[in-house]
Image: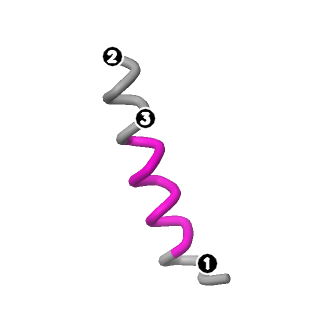
Amino acid sequence: MSEYIHKSHNVSVLLYHLVFPA
């Protein structure tokens, strides 16, 4: 279960940087 949450978190972070590039 923790692996699924970790992967989802990584996807959220990637999408965040795509929408709000540094």
Q: Characterize the magenta stretch by its predominant secondary structure.
A: helix
Spatial CA distance of label 3 from label 1 is 21 Å
Q: Amino acid at mark 3?
A: His
- For image coordinates 40% across by 20% down, the residue present is 2
Give the numbered dot on residue 6.
Answer: 3
The kind of secondary structure element at disc 2 is loop
Q: Do tag 1 and tag 2 residues touch (Cβ < 8 Å)? A: no
Looking at the picture, does residue 12 appear above or below residue 7?
below
Q: Which residue of the protein is positioned furthest toward the right in this rendering?
A: 22
Q: Amino acid at mark 2?
A: Met
Q: Which residue of the protein is positioned furthest toward the bottom in this rendering?
A: 21
- For image coordinates 54% across by 66% down, the residue present is 16
Residue at mark 1: 20
- For image coordinates 32% across by 29% down, the residue present is 4
Looking at the picture, does residue 16 appear above or below residue 20?
above
Counting every numbered tag in the picture gives: 3
Residue at mark 2: 1
The kind of secondary structure element at disc 3 is helix
Spatial CA distance of label 1 from label 2 is 28 Å
Spatial CA distance of label 2 from label 3 is 9 Å
What residue range appears in magenta? Answer: 8-17
Looking at the image, what colour scheme do you see? Answer: one colour
In what quadrant of the picture does the N terminus appear?
top left
**Dot 1, crowdedness within 10 Å: few (<14), some or many (≥20)?**
few
Q: Nearer the viewer, mark 3 or mark 1?
A: 3
**Dot 3, crowdedness within 10 Å: few (<14), some or many (≥20)?**
few
Q: Position of residue 22 (x, y in %)?
A: 67, 82
Give the mark nearer the N terminus: 3 vs 1. Answer: 3
